[in-house]
Amino acid sequence: MKANYGYKDGSGEYFITIDTDLCNACGKCVSACKYNVFKVDEDPNDPLSDKQVALVVDKQRTNIKYVCAPCKPVNREYTLPCVEACEAKAIKHSW
Ligand code: SF4
Ligand code: SF4
């Protein structure tokens, strides 16, 4: 399942998408993000499963535009630290 966290406003769309089918709960995104955007926990979107997955923490969900701004690529060759850390390729950003 693809879990979308974020919002859009007049300046654009700011979403982090985590593919929970690909996520193996390794925690590397948690370590890679120095702004504490991620945690690994049971998936509240899938109450029938006790599988651990990466989640965007509640307090960052309405703050993505600002908290992720320092990581924003200046050219297309640069990869976001969280995306680069995820060997399972479970993380995508909308920008
Ligand atoms: S883009 Fe940067 S601040 Fe945003 S979640 Fe990824 S590592 Fe964290
Ligand atoms: S790095 Fe990728 S596979 Fe590991 S916990 Fe984060 S999203 Fe899941």
Image (spheres, rainbow, N blue to C red):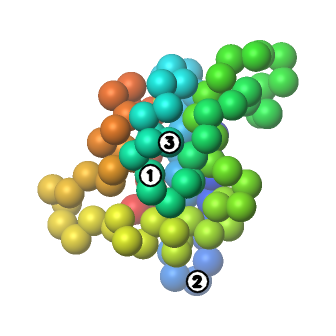
The vertical placement of 30 against 62, above or below, is: above
State the residue lying farthest toward the bottom.
10
Task: Assign a secondary structure to mark 3.
Answer: helix
Q: Give the residue type that dot 2 points to.
A: Gly
Determine if residue 65 is in view.
yes
Q: Quadrant of the N terminus?
A: top right
Determine if residue 2 is in view.
no
Tell me whether circle 1 and circle 3 mark residues in contact (CB < 8 Å).
Answer: yes
Q: Residue at x 15, y 56 (%)?
A: 77
Q: Residue at x 56, y 65 (%)?
A: 64
Q: Quadrant of the C terminus?
A: bottom left
Q: Give the residue type that dot 3 points to.
A: Val
In the rendered image, which quarter is residue 25 located in? top right
Task: Assign a secondary structure to mark 1.
Answer: loop
Alpha carbon distance from label 3 to label 2: 29 Å
The vertical placement of 21 against 29, above or below, is: above
Q: Is mark 1 within 8 Å of ligand 1?
A: yes
Q: Residue at x 30, y 42 (%)?
A: 84
Of the numbered discs 3 and 2, the one sitting upstream in the chain is 2
Identify the residue position indicated by label 3 in the image.
30
In the rendered image, which quarter is residue 3 located in? top right
Identify the residue position indicated by label 1 in the image.
33
| 79 sits left or right of 19 in the view | left
Q: Is mark 3 within 8 Å of ligand 2?
A: yes
Q: Position of residue 69 (x, y in %)?
A: 42, 72
Q: Give the residue type that dot 1 points to.
A: Cys
Alpha carbon distance from label 2 to label 1: 26 Å
Question: Count the marks: how many?
Answer: 3
Residue 10 is marked as: 2
Q: Position of residue 59 (x, y in %)?
A: 71, 61
Q: Residue at x 38, y 34 (%)?
A: 86
Of the numbered discs 2 and 1, the one sitting upstream in the chain is 2
